Structure formats: structure tokens, C-alpha cells
Image: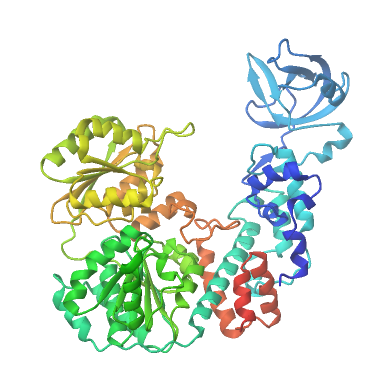
Amino acid sequence: MRPAALFPLFAPLTTLPGVGPKLAKPVAKAVGGERVIDVLFHLPFALVDRQLRPSIAEAPVNEVATLTVTVESHRPGRGARAPYRVVVSDGTAELHLVYFKAEGDWLSRLLPIGATRVISGRIEAYEGQLQMPHPDHVVAPEDAGKIPPLEPIYPLSAGVGARVMAKIVQGALARAPGDLPEWQDRHLLAREGWAPWREAFETLHKPKTAEDVSPDGAARQRLAYDELLANQLALSLVRRQLRRQRGRPVIGTGAVQEKLRAALPYCLTTGQETAIAEIAGDLAAPLRMLRLLQGDVGAGKTVVALFAMAIAVEAGRQACLMAPTELLARQHGKSLAPLCAAAGLRLGVLTGRDTGAARRRLLAELATGEIDILVGTHALLEGEVSWRDLGLAVIDEQHRFGVDQRLTLAAKGEDGLDVLVMSATPIPRTLTLTAFGDMDVSRLTEKPAGRQKIDTRVVSLSRLDEMVEAVARALDRGAQVYWVCPLVTESETSDAAAAEDRFAHLAARFGAAVGLVHGRMKAAEKDRVMQEFAGGALRLLVATTVIEVGVDVPNATVMIIEQAERFGLAQLHQLRGRVGRGSEASFCILMMADNAGKTARQRLETLRDTDDGFVIAEADLKIRGAGEILGTKQSGVPEFRLVDLDRHAGLMEIAHDDARLVLETDPQLESPRGQALRHLLYLFERDAAVRYLASG
């Protein structure tokens, strides 16, 4: 149960002074939540320095200044749209305070003629006259101390002004308990010069220097480390829970593996052999396996998974392979079928589309052990799916499944299920720890023999007509082509090329040879179009990123990605991996908008110059930061509130080691520091991890 000391932080926004039900809605939108803690975690992104106090004559244009002035006159606007002007002076020059849609009575009370006022805001010049539109602060001289010399600036949403947000944040800060037990190691605090938790928030929300709000400042570093440690501790506890039930050692005979090797048209790479050996070692151990298999598109992860499943079958057990979409599940079934047949492995495929007698027959065969390996979607998690003896689960595209789904699948095995998860998204080590800190990792860094290098080029979007002609030539020589667009339809907020519009444009030229797939189509319709493209009935496929994980079409040798600067590098690399799967030379054309900046070009040139997914992922992390690196919120990487993974990557390694050491020396978190760390887990809402402690 959450400690009572944290209750004030998890109270609704409406418990804060001045926040009623009406204001609570836009505040919740701005801070990303409906509780006091969401406001506390809403960090300033900049500072306004109000320490400059010149005379009006010396005030620099386009900078913020704080001035002491006398009110000379009021000039109401002529007409509904004309601004209301208040003329002030200080003996050196005049300044106009400009208000739009302001009430004269209110301004007369705020700025009575003849009164002295201290004002602060941005100085502008308009038609030779200095002015200050809507001053941020207007106070009497005796209240000048109320104007903060350094004012933190927060992200806002419609309906919440900067002054209102600042007040609400101070209200939340007042609720932050100052007497929580210290959960960090005192030697680390001393070495880094980090203040206590409450004091760090004071520094961020009441800054005295620009350093105080910097991501590299001591206060932010301290709080980022708190969040990273909570993340790593929770992942370690999940891992321990998954491995707590001792597994049944799964030791293969090698007989099926030998047949698989003989059936393969190529030799396994060194990386694949190493990964198979690591997996075999995990399976043979009495503890349950939880391993991540990372490898680029085309690195041969599925073959490694097949060998892992073969070991389980050799040991007399069953295995399953779970994919995120029906299309991918069927693709896996199709690609594995010849190898399974050659090795004597009985393969089944189960998706949501399988119904009636065929489904009942397949489930019956599974229950009696007549099926060795079952490939499917999350339908494999349904209660009616029962196994004779499930020993190994392989999860493809791991980042699309949550920890809860992993646990549901793990519960399917009688004596503890071994779990192998695969990801084709190359993730830098920092992010691997963040999302998969609970797993051992095998990496496939080589490309299998025979894979084509993809000739990647960056061209201007203004050469669109040339690209259409190049597509015509590719189609004439029998190739198939992908044309990828960033959005489905035009919107008022984006000038991105729309897949539907591009489809109409290309269909006018190439007729029935063109197909369209995007995320808003029904799954069955999407599958139908993809299958038509895979079968060759369609020659040109216009698509959004739904093809990032999709069918294997060896005849597709050209990919054109429109407005490529709008995609993440890892995502572009994934898309590019859809071509180069056959024996023909393959091309990827990255079309970039003419007004895209230097950074955009730099990113695309990285992709042009290398096909190493891990190099690309590291470059993406440096250039864009971690927030967007996987392209989706469902990426499995938690959304941090206080951590900037790009800036705080170094702290992740420390947190990883600290969490491991804590659980080795105090597995139930019962020591004084352990009890304090329980507060930390509750603070960052890792409640499930605390429940694992409670369950022993």
C-alpha cells in the first residue's frame, strides 16, 4: 500500500489552491495527468531573466527588461480591433504598454495616471516607437520584490497562462513532503554533490541561476537518477519474479537441429551460432530463460528462434512463436513450413481469423501434442488455447507487447516457461537497459550471406516527376516498388504528403498495378492488399509505415520514402529492410523536402552511408534524443518524466548496477535503505514491483 507520506502528491489537481474543475482540465492536458504529482513533475524548459533594469532609453529591443515608470496617459483603441495603449515614461523616454481586448476600467485601476509602477516584459519597436505588449508584471514599487529575478517557463496548453501555471506549480511544490527517508546511497550523493529529493525540486521550480534548470544541473541529475533507479529496480524485480519458479531443464538431443542445418540453403553466421549456443545454455539451466534476441532486419533472427524451438521439441516439449499481426504470423508460418517439414517438426498456425471446425481440430491437436510448434498472434494468450507441454515461447517484435502480456504467456507453461523475445529495432545499449533491463541480450550484428547491400540515395522532393519516371522504368523491367508516405490524409496542421493523394496520383499513371495500405484500413483489407502485392498482382504499393513490419517480397527492389526527414532513423532503417531480400540489386530513395534543415540532411546522410542498424540507432539517439527513437509510444521504452535519456544516458549504467547490488544484498528491501526504496517505487508508480516483494 502506498505510504501515507505520499498521499498529498497523488491527490486530484482540484485540491491545489485556485484549481477548480474548469481549470483542472487544461492544466491536466498541459502537465500530462490529473494529480498533484503530475504538476510537480512538470519541469520548466527555460528561464526568463528579469534582472536587466535599464532606463527606457537604454532598453534593448527584443529583450526582457524590468523598468520603473510613471503613468502619463491612457489611449483607448478606436475600433474593436485596435489595441489599448498606456503611455509611460521615466524621464529618459516614452514607452507604450499595448493591450489587446483589454477592459479600460481594469487598466485604469492597474495603471492610474500619475502613479509609479514597476513593469517587466519584452521590449519591442513598432513604427519607431518603443512598446511592451501585455507586460508580464505590473506592480507598485513596494511590491517590486514579488517580480522574480529569474522566472521558470513551463510548457502550457490552451486555457492556462504562464502566470497561472507558475502559481499552480508552487502549490504542488508546497505539497511535496520534506521528511521522506533518503533512498539514495549517501556516498553517491556526496560524490555527485546532489541535494535531498525535496531540495532538488525547490531548485528546479525556484531557480536562482540558469544552471538550476539545466538538464545537466545537479538538481535535474539527482531527480533523473531517482527515476532511472526506480525503473531499473522495478525491471529487476519483474525479472526475478519471472525466474523465481525454477524451470525444468530443457536439453536437446541435436537430432532435429542436425536436420535443420542440412535443410538450410546457407551456413549460419558466427553471430547466429553464438546466439543459439547462448539460448541452449539458458534452456539447459534450472532457471527460467528470459532472453532478448536483437538483430537487424534480415539478420536471421527467425532461424535462430527455430533452432531454439527445435531444442524444446527435442526435449519432448512444445514451442510457440507469437507475432504482433496476423499478416506477420502467417508470413512466419509460410517461411518456416519447408524447414519444419524437412526436420520433421509439426507446425501449426493460429490467428483470430481461424474459426469453426478447423480451429477446433487445431486446438485438439495442440492439446494432445500432435503439434510441436504453433505460430500465432496474441490469440495464443486466449484461455481456450491449451498445450500438452509448452516449454518455450518466442515473441517477435517484443516492443509491441507489454510486460503484462509477457507474464500471461509465461503462466501458460506448467513447469515455468522459457521466453525468448526478438526485436528488429536496433536499440542503443542505454535504451536496451531502459526497456529490457530484465533480460539477457544476444545480438546478431552480421548479415546472412546473399543479402544485397541496398543502394541508398538522398534526393530533393522537387524531383518528384523524375522519381515517377524511375518507377516506370523499374516496373518495365519487372521489379516491384514500395512508395512510402508519412501521413494518411492531408490535415490543416501538416503539409505532409498524404498516402491517399499519392495513390490517386500514381494510379492515374499506372492504373490497376497500384495498391494502397495504411493504418486506418481494416486488418482484413490491409492483409488482402499486402497479399496481392506479395503474390505479384500489384506491382506498386503506396503505404504508410504499416509495412515497417510486413510481408517478405523478394521481387521488391525499389523503395521510395517521401519526406524522409519526418521519420526516425531507426524507422527508416526498418523500412529500407523491406527491399534487398532477393538476388537483384536494390535501391532506397530518400526524398527530402527542400526546406528541411541541416540536421535533417545530416540524419539522412547517416542512413545513406551505413547499413549497420546499431550505428544508425546510436546516431539517432545523439541527433534526436530518446523521446522519438522508436517512433511510437507503444515502443516498450517507458515515458520518463524527469529523465532526458540523451543527456542522462551515463546515469543509466550506474542505476542498473545499483539496482542489481541492492537486490543481491537486500532482496526483500527490508533494510533502512530498502524501506526508503519502497517509497521510491511507489513515487514513480512501480506498484507492481512492490507487489512482487509482498508475494515473496
Residue drawn at 64 percent across, 14 percent down: 128
In the rendered image, the residue lying farthest to the top is 78
Residue drawn at 59 percent across, 85 percent down: 665
In the rendered image, the residue lying farthest to the left is 477
Q: Quadrant of residue 102?
A: top right
- Whole-percent x and y of residue 129? 67, 16
Q: Does residue 446 appear in the picture of this structure?
A: no
Up/down of 695 relative to 157, above or below: below
- Whole-percent x and y of residue 658? 56, 75
Of residues 174 and 350, the one nearer the viewer is 350
Q: Looking at the rendering, in which quadrant would you find the C terminus? A: bottom right
Residue drawn at 66 percent across, 58 percent down: 219
- Whole-percent x and y of residue 545? 36, 48
Residue drawn at 13 percent across, 56 percent down: 583
| Left or right, residue 55 beside residue 674 | right
Q: Does residue 80 appear in the picture of this structure?
A: yes
- Whole-percent x and y of residue 325? 36, 59
